[in-house]
Structures are given as C-alpha cells and as structure tokens.
Amino acid sequence: MRRYLAGILKEFWLLKRDIHALMVLFVMPSLFILIMSLAMRDAFSQNSGVHLKAMVVCEENTTASRDFVAHLKAIKGFEWSEGKTTQVPAQMMERDILLGVVVRAGFDEATHKNTPQNRKLTVLISPEATPIAKILFETAVGGTAAKINMINQMSSLNPWMTREEKEAALVDKVWFEEHFLRGEESTDVRPTSVQQSVPAWLIFSMFFIIIPISNTFVNERRLGTLARLAVMNVSVTGVLLSKMIPYFVINQIQFVAMLMVGMFVVPRFGGDALNIGDNIGALLVVSSVLSFASISYALALASFVRTTDQAVTIGGVLNIIFAAIGGIMVPLFVMPDFMQQLALLSPMSWGLESFLALFLHNAHVSDILPPLGALILFGSICLGLAGWKLNRELKEAL
Amino acid sequence: MISTLNVTKTFGEKSALNGVSFFVPRGSITGLIGRNGAGKTTLMGILCGLTRPDTGSVQIDGVELFENMTHAREKIGYVPQKTSLYPQLTGRENLTYFGMILGLGGKKLTRSMDEVVAATSLGEVLDVRVSHYSGGMQKRLNLAIGLLGNPPILYLDEPTVGVDRESREIILETLVKMSRERGTTILYISHYLQEIEKICDRLVILDQGVVVANDLAENLLRDGESLEQYLEENVQK
C-alpha cells in the first residue's frame, strides 16, 4: 500500500511542476468550451428551433402593412427586428441579419386588388444565408402576404364580416398532422453548442494526459529508473497501477471542472447553461471508463516511443486525428454518412456518444454499453501492450 | 554474501556467460572487472533478478534468488550506472519516494534519510531540485538512494563515471565506511582500475563470459603489481 501511495505522491509532485501539462489539461479545454460554445451557439441553435435573424421595414403605415408585420412576427423560427430600408443592407454587411423584407408603399392597395402583392414587397437575402434559410424566408413572406390578401379579398366579398371573423377564418388553421418517422421518442435529438462542446473538449483534454504521463514515463525508462524499481521489488503491474491511480484522479478533476465551466461559466458569457441530465451515476461511469481508456492509451504510447518529444508529437497528432474524425472538432451530425461511419474508429467518438446519450436522452448505463464496452476493450488492449513492452524492456534494462 | 554457481546465459548463438561461479564474502568489497563485452552487464542483470540464467544458481545471503525473488531482493541495494532519479523533484522528494517504495515510513524513513544524506554530504542541497545538481551531486544522490534502508548487499555499477574529484572521494569513502562499519557486502563494477585497487579487497575478473580470476586482491596483485599490469599480462593478451 505504501508503494502505491509513494507512486501517487511522486506523480502529484511531478505534475505540480509541469505547468505546461496543467495548462493543456485544464486551461485549454476550459477556453475551448467557452469559445466554441459561444461561437457555435447560433449554428447549433437550429437544433432547438430555427432562429434566423431578419428585419422587416414598412414604408407605409396602413392596416394591411401592420397586419402583415404582425403575422410575419408570429411565425416561429425568425428573430425579427424593424428598421429603415437603408438599414437592411448595412446590417447584412455587419452580419447582424441574414434576411430582410421591405413593405413598399402601395402594399395596402395591392392587397385589396387582385394584384400580386409580392410586387410591393422586396425580399433581401444575404449571400451568407443558406438555401434552406432563403426558402423558409420566402415561404414565410409569401404565405403571410397571401394571408393578408385573402383577408382583404374577403372584406371585398363580404363587408359584414368582422375583422376577428376574417382572422379566425384564416389564421392558425393547421391543415396537417405532424408525424415523426421514428415516433415521438426519436433519438435524433441534436445537442446545443454547450452540450456538444463540454463533452467534446473534455474528452479531448482527457486524452492529452499523454503529456504528463510521457514526461515521466519515458524518462523513467530512459534513465533506468524502472530497472531500479524492479530491483526494489516493484512489479510491472505495480508500476502501471501507481501511474493509473493519480492520473485517474486528475481526469476526474478535469471532468468536474469542465462540467462546472459548462454549467456556470458559459452562461455568464451569454451562452446556454449545460444541462447534465439526471443520471449522475452514469456520468461518473462514463468519465471513469474514458479515463481508463485515455490513461492506458497514454501508457502504451509512452512505452513504445524513445523520447518525450516523440510521445508528445505522435500523441498530439493521433489525438487531433481522433478528434477530427470522432466528432470532437466537427459535430457528427453535420458529417456525411461515410464520415459518420469513419468516426466509429475513434475512441473519442465512443466517449462523446456516451456523454451525449446521457445529456440528451437521460440514458442509463445499460443504454450505452456498446460504446463503453469499446472503450474498455481499447483501454485493455493498450494496457496489455504497455505491460508487455515494459516486461520485455526490463529484461534488457541493464 | 553473494554466490553464483555455474551460471550460463546465451543470447541466440552467442554465449554471454559460461559457467560463471564466484563467491563474495560478507563485508567485503569485490571489484567486478572485465572489458566491454566480457559479460558484466549480463551478470549484473542476473544478480539483480532481471535476467534469468539458462543454468546455474545465484544465492543472496543464503537465499536462492530465482526461487525467492522478493525476499532475496529485499537484501539488495542497487546503484545503477545511469542516474536513475527524478530531475524535477528535490533530493528530499527523491529519497522519500524511493524510501517509501522500499517500505520505509515515519521515523524509520526519516532516520534512514538522515543517515544516507550525511554519508553522501548532500545536506545542503537536499531541498534543491535535482535538475540543478552537478553531475557529482546527482551520482551521490544515486548512491544515497541505494543505501536507503541499510541493505546488507550493495551492487554499484560504475558509480563514479562523470563525477568530479570531490564527489568521487565522498563516494569511495562512503563505500569503505559501509563495508567496515556495517559489514555491507559490496559488488563494485568500474572501469577506473585505480578506484578498484583503492577500495576493493577482492577481485572477480570476467573475460568473454568466463571468470578468469577470483581471489583476494593481495593474492592477485603481488610485488606491487598494478591491476592494469595484471590485466595486461593475464587477460588482455
């Protein structure tokens, strides 16, 4: 027991003096979470409903134009502002809005006649608007204009109808039922930016445990410290365990710290707060399994390289590749199918899949057994390789 | 005491050790000498229990090494050629870590640390990071770790390579003191023949995996003959 305690103590002493590693483990992911959660908020907001920023300009003050604006603003999915005609292109240049519609003079008169109303409406679309945004906007504007035209046409046909009756005849009529193909419990729920960023960058930083581990482990191999420890009756299992325990603790501190950043820091800067779901026990299981996988991977890598520079370079590049294909840097749901299949090769994606299942679906451990099993298998293979290499090396140590 | 009997080791076709037998009595300082490739490193690996011999046996203080490895190794203090330390830690932290690894704790650890620090004259730099030590200081700390827990048997592999004169003197004096005052059995490997002559009372000379001489130094080096002359005449022909 004292030996394990010695190992833990030593690793903490070493880590305390490894400022660069501490920065990578704690500062880097915190900053990534904050920056990416805020930067991607709007891009991810379509997952919790469309919020396209648009401006409406009225060049005439009539009942029809006021009705048009009121109906337009009632359509979900747009974040409306009002302004002047000249402001529309200016704000598009500033990227404050993507879409604009100008109600030109003569709109009211046109809606009472059977003249196509859109001739009195000018739609402005930013080049940065996606085709889907453009279609949504034009449908909203066209539909609203048709509605106003219909109300006014009804007035011509039936002047005794009250305004409320006319509205009731047209407004809020839903002509279809909504059915999701996968039923109400669809699993295709997409994360918000903070739900994506926190687990993604947490996993990324957990895999960067390679830096402090290789800093000590490669030196221990190079300087013959492992041989010395072997003569002191420390087994290979003892060496590996005494490294796993302190770094497991470090990983768990990272886990709690990054959740805190998502829950309390990101909202302070205007982002959404992270909702971690109800299953805290399952979260701890995921973070523990991830930690086992990342530490074992780091130990395996540190066992095979010759220098710390090699470990940091190879480990860093592999981590970035794992992150790029694993949905850490680019969310999986925006990737094409073949890339989503490729992501299955990355242990980071197994961890991310597990976390997202807990955040988005309040899943239980039994629901995420496949990715957790993959992580455990990956970690066990890595640990086995590290043990095999160390055993072999100790026989040739002197 | 250390005894080996008929130890052989081959790597593929190459014979590294061929029937090596020698005896190191308790309390003696025995110099293990040989040219590069003579088999010293392989023998040290076997004596540490890191390499298993093909045949033969090794006894450490009467305990069969490869039958009761843990017990036998508890008797060994090992000072490797490389300074196997943690440069980012202080001398005190290094000693504490290795002391705890040896199972020392509390007052036992403090007492043992005080002893080895005094023996190696490291008191003034104990709380300085090892990366700031001179090469000599690092070698002294390397030795101090080997002395922790007062092991009855001490293996030293080139402990003075790259060491300044002052540190070399301290190391050699410490070893002689350990042998005389505590009866520590010391097996000393070095290329510095003068050091061997100075502190070793017994010599084991290895050549091409075979023990060519194993006797008291005074029996081997007669009439004021130096070790270098002896080796030139008897081994390096």
Image: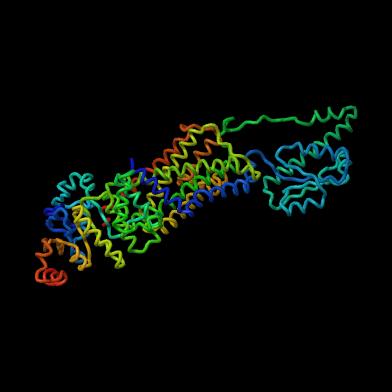
Residue B31 percent coordinates (x, y):
18, 61
Q: Which quadrant would residue B155 be assigned to in this image?
A: bottom left
The N terminus of chain A sits in image quarter: top left
Residue A53's place in the image compared with B142, above or below, is above
Residue B193's place in the image compared with A232, above or below, is below
Left or right of A212? Residue A191 is right
Residue B114's place in the image compared with A150, above or below, is below
- Compare residues A22 and A104 and report the one nearer the observer: A22
Question: In the image, what residue occupies the spot 89% across and 41% down?
Answer: A109
Look at the image and tell me whether residue B149 can be seen.
Answer: yes
Q: Which quadrant would residue B121 be assigned to in this image?
A: bottom left
- Compare residues A214 and B154 and report the one nearer the observer: B154
Residue B57 percent coordinates (x, y):
14, 50
Question: In the image, what residue occupies the spot 46% across and 36% down?
Answer: A285
Look at the image and tell me whether residue B11 can be seen.
Answer: no
- Compare residues A84 and A34 and report the one nearer the observer: A34
Left or right of B174? Residue B57 is left
Residue B103 percent coordinates (x, y):
30, 44
Q: Which quadrant would residue A278 be assigned to in this image?
A: top right
- Compare residues A267 and B186 and report the one nearer the observer: B186
Residue B147 percent coordinates (x, y):
27, 53
Residue B132's place in the image compared with B226, above or below, is above
